[in-house]
Image (spheres, helix red, strand yellow):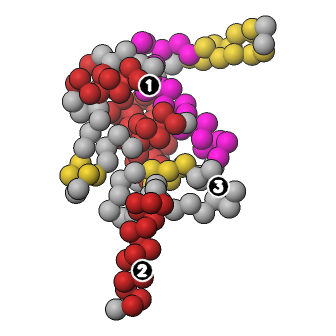
């Protein structure tokens, strides 16, 4: 799930300017290789498509059905191993990482429903996975976004 968060958070706003970790071919290839991919141009194109679709789904701006084209032709094959059941993903090599991200999203929705969400700071484009017991986390970072929001509220109250 960490790779999924890394993908969702690969287009942050830095000083009001959008950055894209997958936009630069060399940087995108490095990102993909660090997350188990090959870094090919086709893989990066599909990763950007998956990221944008997943961001819209998590924000509630698009239905999960927009992810269907990413899963066309994908198969999971069960294999019995000495340590139990294992699923093998069958997909074109350039699509594997994007498909794994969609499957990670589905797993998060199944195991931790409603806990993958955008940061509550309107000026932030990052996402968080709330692992807290109370399911009340609102910010991607308490030190950055949470602190800014609390400072804004304090300033508004004392003005």
Say which label, 3 or 2, has the lower sequence index. 3
Q: Which residues are magenta?
A: 89-112
Residue 62 among those drawn in magenta: no
Mark 1 Cα-neighbour bin, 10 Å: few <14, some 14–19, many ≥20 = some
Say which label, 3 or 1, has the lower sequence index. 1
How far apart are the two marked residues, 3 and 2, measured between alpha carbons?
A: 23 Å
Q: Quadrant of the N terminus?
A: top right
Residue beneath the point at 56% across and 60% down: 137
Left or right side of 146 for 52: left
Give the labeled residue for mark 3.
Answer: 132
Q: Main secondary structure of the magenta part?
A: helix
Residue beneath the point at 20% across and 52% down: 17
Q: Nearer the viewer, residue 90 or 66?
A: 90
Q: Is residue 84 above or below residue 19?
A: above
Residue reaching furthest to the bottom: 159
Residue beneath the point at 29% across and 35% down: 21
Residue 122 seen in render? yes
How far apart are the two marked residues, 3 and 1, measured between alpha carbons?
A: 25 Å
Task: Please state the horizontal and vertical placement of residue 27, each as a whole percent of the image.
Answer: 26, 27
Give the labeled residue for mark 1.
Answer: 35
Give the labeled residue for mark 2.
Answer: 153
């Amino acid at each position: 799930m960490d790779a999924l968060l890394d993908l969702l958070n690969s287009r942050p706003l830095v000083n009001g300017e959008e950055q894209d970790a997958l936009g630069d071919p060399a940087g995108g290839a490095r990102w993909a290789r660090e997350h188990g991919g090959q870094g090919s141009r086709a893989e990066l194109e599909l990763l950007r498509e998956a990221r944008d679709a997943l961001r819209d789904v998590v924000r509630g701006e698009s239905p999960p059905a927009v992810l269907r084209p990413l899963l066309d032709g994908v198969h999971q094959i069960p294999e019995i191993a000495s340590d139990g059941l294992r699923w093998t993903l069958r997909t074109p090599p350039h699509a594997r990482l994007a498909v794994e991200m969609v499957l990670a999203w589905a797993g998060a929705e199944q195991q931790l429903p409603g806990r993958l969400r955008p940061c509550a700071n309107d000026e932030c484009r990052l996402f968080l996975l709330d692992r807290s017991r109370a399911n009340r986390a609102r910010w991607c970072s308490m030190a950055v976004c949470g602190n800014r929001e609390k400072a804004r509220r304090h300033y508004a109250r004392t003005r």
